[in-house]
Image (cartoon, grey):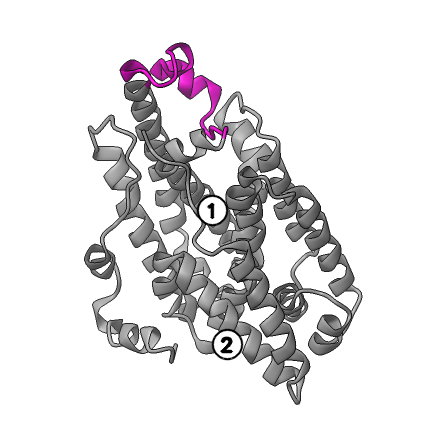
């Protein structure tokens, strides 16, 4: 039996980061300096919470990489509220409402330091800067926060289509859209293909995450597996905690990974739609997460195990000609 998932950072650690960052922003001599300070803090969040995504995004040009770091921080904290702190008794809904109100307030300002001075969280203020720079539709982040609210009151999904439309779109696809606006398309006419690629990749990554976290989510009272998949594998009709249920759940996990493979293929076939300077990072992302997906897909293990790709295997999925960037990244230069 797995223990309940524990926090990477405590809520107090997050709040301390927010307060220190607020002071740094307000003491900055310009919005440019303030932006760089928030981007550096966002980089720390990404490095702490996702080794894989941290590695692959180091292959982006500096300006794009900093914006991606900020996007990650803006989605990581709300996700932590509902996934980690919500189940522990924290009033996650109230904090999520406050965060959402901060986003609305930030949209009504024009400068980073001004936004933070009005009480908006520095990560939200910087995220809205990313939205302004790239002309990203404001509603995408509202869709993301809506998906986070769904986590507070988990529901079941009858089919894969309902899972994607009712949850994955908000939790993953729109995040892919944020990134696409920053990555850029190879030509203006290819932007639609790039967003389609982002949608397929977002679905693939989310299905892989669902498969990896299937037992952790169960401990949180959630199960992001369509009811028809659970019925087909027998997980819907076996008693929770029994050997038969674990075996059926393992089958369902492999089925999710199998579906994810198709979406990875679709995303890979459209990489040329992105700007040349972003393709290495996107391809590396697909390669690294696909390794995890294949581990799940080919495993015969029925025990409640959470799979992860060893660091040396992640390196093998990265472009060898760019390995020199990795030590620089860990020294804080990228």
What kind of element bears circle 2? helix
Residue drawn at (55%, 78%), measured in percent from left and top?
A: 37
- Residue furthest bottom as drawn: 29
Occupied quadrant, residue 104: bottom right
Numbered disc 1: secondary structure: helix
Question: Looking at the image, do the residues carrying marks 1 and 2 touch, with CB atoms under 8 Å apart?
Answer: no
User: Tag on residue 63?
Assistant: 2
Q: Residue furthest top?
A: 237
Observer able to see residue 177: no
Looking at the image, residue 298 sits to the left or right of residue 201; the answer is: left
Near-viewer residue (298 or 34): 34
Q: Is residue 311 left or right of residue 58?
A: left
Residue drawn at point x = 53 percent, y = 73 percent: 39
Please state the horizontal and vertical placement of residue 122, each as a whole percent of the image.
Answer: 64, 69
Crowd band around label 2 with a 10 angstrom C-alpha radius: few (<14), some (14–19), many (20+)? few
The CA distance from mark 1 to mark 2 is 23 Å
Which residue is located at x 20 percent, y 28 percent?
300
| Quadrant of the image occupied by residue 277 | bottom left
Q: Tell me if residue 180 is in the magenta stretch.
A: no
Residue 202: numbered disc: 1
Camera-nearest residue between 221 and 319? 221
Magenta range: 221-245
Specify whether 201 is left or right of 283.
right
């Amino acid at each position: 039996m797995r223990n309940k998932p524990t926090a990477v950072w405590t809520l107090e650690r997050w709040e301390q980061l927010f307060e220190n960052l607020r002071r740094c922003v307000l003491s900055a001599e310009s919005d440019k300096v303030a932006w760089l300070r928030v981007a550096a803090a966002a980089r720390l969040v990404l490095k702490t919470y996702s080794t894989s995504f941290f590695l692959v995004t180091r292959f982006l040009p500096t300006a794009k990489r900093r914006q991606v770091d900020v996007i990650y921080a803006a989605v990581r904290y709300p996700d932590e509220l509902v996934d980690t702190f919500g189940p522990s008794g924290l009033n996650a809904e109230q904090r999520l409402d406050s965060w959402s109100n901060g986003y609305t307030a930030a949209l009504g300002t024009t400068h980073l330091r001004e936004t933070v001075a009005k009480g908006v969280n520095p990560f939200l203020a910087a995220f809205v800067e990313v939205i302004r720079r790239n002309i990203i539709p404001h509603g995408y982040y509202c869709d993301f926060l809506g998906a986070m609210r769904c986590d507070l009151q988990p529901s079941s999904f009858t089919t894969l289509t309902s899972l994607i439309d009712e949850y994955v779109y908000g939790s993953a696809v729109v995040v892919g859209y944020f990134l696409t606006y920053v990555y850029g398309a190879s030509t203006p006419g290819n932007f639609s293909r790039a967003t389609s690629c982002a949608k397929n990749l977002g679905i693939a990554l989310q299905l892989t995450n669902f498969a990896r976290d299937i037992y952790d989510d169960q401990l949180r009272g959630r199960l992001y597996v369509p009811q028809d998949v659970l019925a087909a594998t027998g997980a819907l009709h076996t008693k929770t905690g029994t050997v038969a249920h674990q075996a059926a759940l393992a089958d369902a996990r492999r089925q999710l990974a199998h579906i994810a493979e198709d979406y990875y293929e679709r995303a890979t076939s459209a990489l040329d739609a992105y700007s040349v300077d972003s393709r290495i990072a996107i391809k590396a992302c697909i390669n690294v997460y696909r390794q995890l997906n294949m581990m799940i897909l080919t495993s015969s293990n029925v025990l409640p195990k959470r799979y992860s790709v060893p660091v040396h295997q992640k390196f093998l999925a990265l472009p060898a000609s760019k390995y020199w960037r990795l030590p620089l990244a860990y020294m804080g230069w990228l």
